Image (spheres, rainbow, N blue to C red):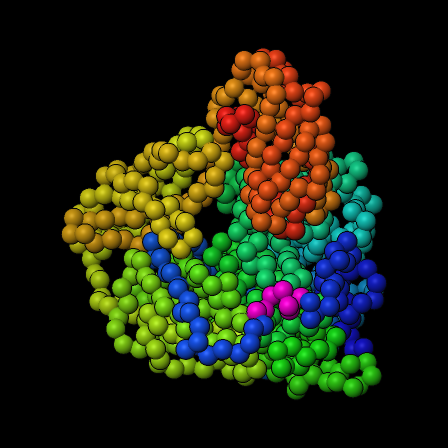
Amino acid sequence: MTHSTHDHGASRPGAMPLSMARLPMPKAPLRVASAVVLALAVLTVPAAHADDVTPVAVTVNARAALATVPETGIGTNHAIWDTNLGTDQTADRLKDAGVKMLRYPGGSYSDIYHWADHTAPGGYVAPATDFDTFMRGVRRTGAQAMVTANYGTGTAEEAAAWVRSANVTKGYGIKYWEIGNENYGNGRYGSAWEADDHADKSPAEYARNVVAYADAMKAADPSIKIGAVLTTPANWPDGLVAAGDDGTWNKVVLSIAGSKIDFVILHWYPGALDKAAHVPDMIQLTRRQIAAYAGHGSERIGIAMTEFNTGTSSGGTNTQPGALAAADAYATLLANGVFTVDWWNAHNGIGTVTQVEGQTDYGDFGLLSSATCTSDGGVCEPPLNTPFAPYFALQMMSRFARSGDQFIGAATDQAAVGAHAVRRPNGDLAVMLINRSSGTSYPVTIGYSGFTPASGAPTVLTHTNGATSITGSTAGSAVSQTLPPLSLTTIVLRPASAQTGLPGAPGRPTASNVTDRTATISWPAASAGARPIVKYEVHRQEGAVSEQLGETAGTSFTVGNLRPGTRYTVNVIARDSGGGVSWASPPLTFTTGTPASSSCTVRLTDQTDWGSGYVGAIDITNNGAPINGWTLNFGWPRTWQSLSGGWSAVWTQTGPDVKVVNESSNGSLATGGSTTIGFVGNYNGPNILPAVFTLNGTVCQTT
């Protein structure tokens, strides 16, 4: 194999090709045949025309505001073993895709790379891939750089010298600097693919060094931002605690280094094409860990997804199903506030060749062809820098969601069709629709809330299966379109009338005094437009629709009638004396608790976790009158969670609901009496633990 097909990225044990080595070895069960993966992710139904199927209802809600699109949102990785890293043709291709972040020097190579002499002992370094060449390509692309400092075999002093050379001597102005790459893969949890010369492989040692690196690097340039490596929720080794550690990797790293970092680093190779639904919980769990462990001011810490690929080991990764999954994941990650998503990789090399949806899939994790061949020479990729399908997914994303746009709520009533939407600063709105069906053209009807589209045919951008470009047309209407099979479609809409003099958007809300039933929402005042602001409205997001929770003339409102243990996302809008409405504020997400006092108390602990399941213990305390016989009820928060078995009680599960009935030995609980029961829970996505328990019908306090 050529060097570009060796495991030079975030490498894993053994000498597998990179496209087979993106997932840690404990995830081996995910290495199913590509045909199986695609059967799960793409609806393969008999061919049907739009006239034969029920129209899909799409809902777009401009008042359900999500994150603002960052300038650095669309990114990709470069690697020093790629002979085409620094070419003008590569830079121009990436520029045409709208790439705004380029990461260097390439996955696991980061932890063996020495920038000063451009060497990577034990690895291959291609000609013309040095740092200055990389930066020339960054500038030609019109992007920013994400640079990974060598933690595994380097020092804080070496990293600081790199910052000084890059930003002080040469004036490159590089803002984002990571400390190491996937350093949890140093053998601490059993698998060792990441170079690490430190005698101590613990997360505490990594965190102590992050502090030292941050201090040294910011002494060279105080304006830079430092990122620390975390494990991604529900992805190995998340949840594991190694012998001698005070907690999981994330808990230890954030507890020690949280005050010194500016962002955290996640990598995600889901191994299938239908995992975007995991993203909101993945990011919410990461934010919860940051808030719990990183200390005062942790809200400043951003989240970067510096490696992402659909991760289908063989097949689907560089044909249209992979492109649809990529667009869905990019949009969902950015809508949830990730500030960059960086595809692995710009070039990678041929892997296992399959036929997917009538197209040759080369098993290549690159955006662009490396023009490599299988080891027997039987199959070769298309000419160098030919875009693969995910390239067009990034290109569509950059045209759909531009820097400064704000994601808004969008949803459909058909599983085969996905929807995302953004509102632009000039008042325009763009909707991206994803038809995952391989055989059905779906007509869609689009309804809007908080936005009235202009009449006439809108601008429509489309990419279909096997297409070598995105096509533009003026077609359909703002409320009616037809989606070809396996397609990405973006509709760009103008408002029915130019609205001037409207209030500005309220500032980002905060929540205080959150109980099981109430929360106080406060926000910075909006700036008035042509007329005075008369009130603010607080809206709760429920998918792509909104529920108004209340209104006030002030800048604070206490919401009542909330449900215990429930996550809420709200926005605030301002309304003026003429009925004019502002844009929605940035979103606020908070979770209600359980009663401050109750006749029962429940404590759930995750005692032992192995990344796809855990042993849970539930302590039940009776605070009321003596009980002779009890039933505990709770529900799994997500569809990917289930009960494997339990003990010290009789456990049953019906749908998402779990019912636990006492055994004869623990059915009597005196006032103040308690009992402990246990279970094994399974999960294959972010593991949001149950939060609400009822004992004999009463909601318990959860501690």
Q: Quadrant of residue 59?
A: bottom left
The C terminus - image quarter: top right
Horizontal arrangement in the rendering, residue 3 relative to residue 283 (left or right)? right
- For this rendering, which residue is in front, 337 or 205? 337
Q: Quadrant of residue 403?
A: bottom left
Q: Give the answer, above or below, for where 165 lies relative to 480.
A: above
Horizontal arrangement in the rendering, residue 674 relative to residue 183 (left or right)? left
Report how many numbered discs are placed on residues in the image. 0
Residue 155 visible to an observer of this rendering:
no
- For this rendering, which residue is in front, 47 or 111? 47
The magenta stretch is 37-43
Residue 55 visible to an observer of this rendering:
yes
Please name the residue shown 47% across and 57% down the image.
335
Horizontal arrangement in the rendering, residue 520 relative to residue 671 (left or right)? left
Q: Give the answer, above or below, for where 126 lies relative to 72.
A: below
Please name the residue shown 78% across and 47% down the image.
189
Q: Give the answer, above or below, for where 569 lies relative to 99.
A: above
Residue 40 magenta-highlighted: yes
The kind of secondary structure the magenta stretch mainly shows is: helix
Q: Give the answer, above or below, for where 650 lies relative to 379.
A: above
